[in-house]
Amino acid sequence: MPEGRLGRPAARELWTWCLTFVGVAFWCEVLRNSDAADPLAPAAMANSILDVGAFAILAWAMLAARARSLVCDELTSGRLIVGTVFVGLLCTIPFRQATTIALFGLAATLLWRRKATLLGRQAGWLLLALALAWTSSCYLGSIHALVARLDAHAAVFLLNHLGLDVTAQGNLMRRGDFVVEILSACTSSWQLPNVCLAFVVVVLFLRGSFRKTDLLWLALSLLTSVALNEIRLALMARGSAQYEYWHHGTGETIYGVAALAAATLFPLLASLDPADFRRMGRQARQQA
Amino acid sequence: MKILLRLAFSLLIIIGVAAQFAWLRAAHAPADDDGVVLSATAGLGLRVVPVSQVLIQAFAPGCADPARIALVGLDATRLLHASNDAAAGSDGLYVFMGKTAARPAFARFYIMRVLADAQAVFGLRSTRAPSHVVHITLPQSCPKLAKLAWVELSPGSGARSD
């Protein structure tokens, strides 16, 4: 690794520091937001980390693997040193907003930087997807509120077609005396950033770069996520027992597994080579 | 210079982690939004009738129509619910951290929350900022309800939860 004048560290090392600052701030935020009585107890810490989601954990593992190769081997500049110090200072501020700015800033810099390596650009996409998934709950409240109304009407539309007398009023679904209110975390839009994160993680892991056709697969993945959520909401609105089953009980696990499977399936299909699809088509025709 | 920079960066990480720990120590206890609202409503001399986990009705002596009190998340989703249920001929009031507003000034509430959280980091507050705004729907048919000190319902208003 080359060293600049006056024994300056190489650019690669400074970028590694930047990523470390952001990573430490991210995981500190995760632990800090725990609702447990003692957030630093091992069980509470494990829960906090798992709550972030499998794809966020995978994304950080991939970022760690790419940390040393974000940019070409080059001499460092004073501007880069100042930038690294700025990112470090930003990450010492214990507010989610500060870490969010650092995440977006680092992602944008890596994606737009001409001297970023392929691994650097991959890290940029991962950081961008992480930032979007992480901040959607904070800053997209108005969108979720709007989507909650649409969700209520969509779920009621489904139920009415099944012959059930359910009505929608704003973000409420009413069936007789039973009312379900759709809050932000239950809206279809809530999970979409996480679906995008899953797509980015799986595609970059399997293929390492994006193709234009990925947009189609991503759209299918997002639509499937919305459809699954509408089905779950419709199932919950049927009555108190069904609500308990699909919101707190085994149904929640079933929905979680289905959502995870869908979020993984589409990027997997996207990562297959078109030649694989042609071969599978030929095999199917031969068998037919 | 290289060694110095590495030391400085390591120090920044230690300071960052220490700041998070300071936050945890200072501000982990959340403001008891529900408890404050229930006890303060009763303290105003009103009869409290819970409607759901998030909505209560408060009856004043001699008034048929109740005030409806809901905890509204700062993401405004529950505000939607509160707005849905607001009857015609009623006024809205929003209470957050010792301030009242006739309009849902959520941007201002959010800034107040961030500032309060910053105070908690430096030990100037003993609890986290509340995560809810208290939304009160006052019936116009009962003017005396409008004259009550609704600010008392505010979690994190200072004396009550600090």
Image (cartoon, rainbow, N blue to C red):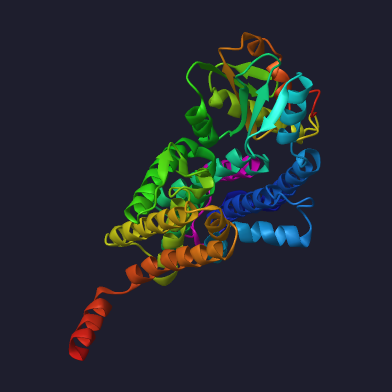
- The residue at 56%/56% (across/down) is A247
| Quarter of the image where one finds residue A288 | bottom left
Q: Quadrant of residue B97?
A: top right
Task: Return the residue nearer the eye: B138 or B110.
Answer: B138
Q: Does residue A87 show up magenta in the picture?
A: yes
Instruction: Mark yes or no: residue A118 visible.
Output: yes
The answer to whether residue A68 is visible is: no
Q: Which residues are magenta?
A: A69-90
Q: Main secondary structure of the magenta part?
A: helix
Front-most of B55 and B36? B55
Q: Is residue A158 left or right of residue B37?
A: left
| Apparent side of residue B126 relative to residue B85 in the rendered image (left or right) | right
Residue B136 position by quadrant:
top right
- Relative image position of residue B11 (x, y in whole percent): 74, 48
Q: Residue at x 66, y 18 (%)?
A: B99
Please identify the quadrant where the C terminus of chain B is shown: top right
Residue A191 placed where, x, y %? 47, 53
The magenta stretch spans residue A96: no
B157 w.r.t. A86: above or below: above
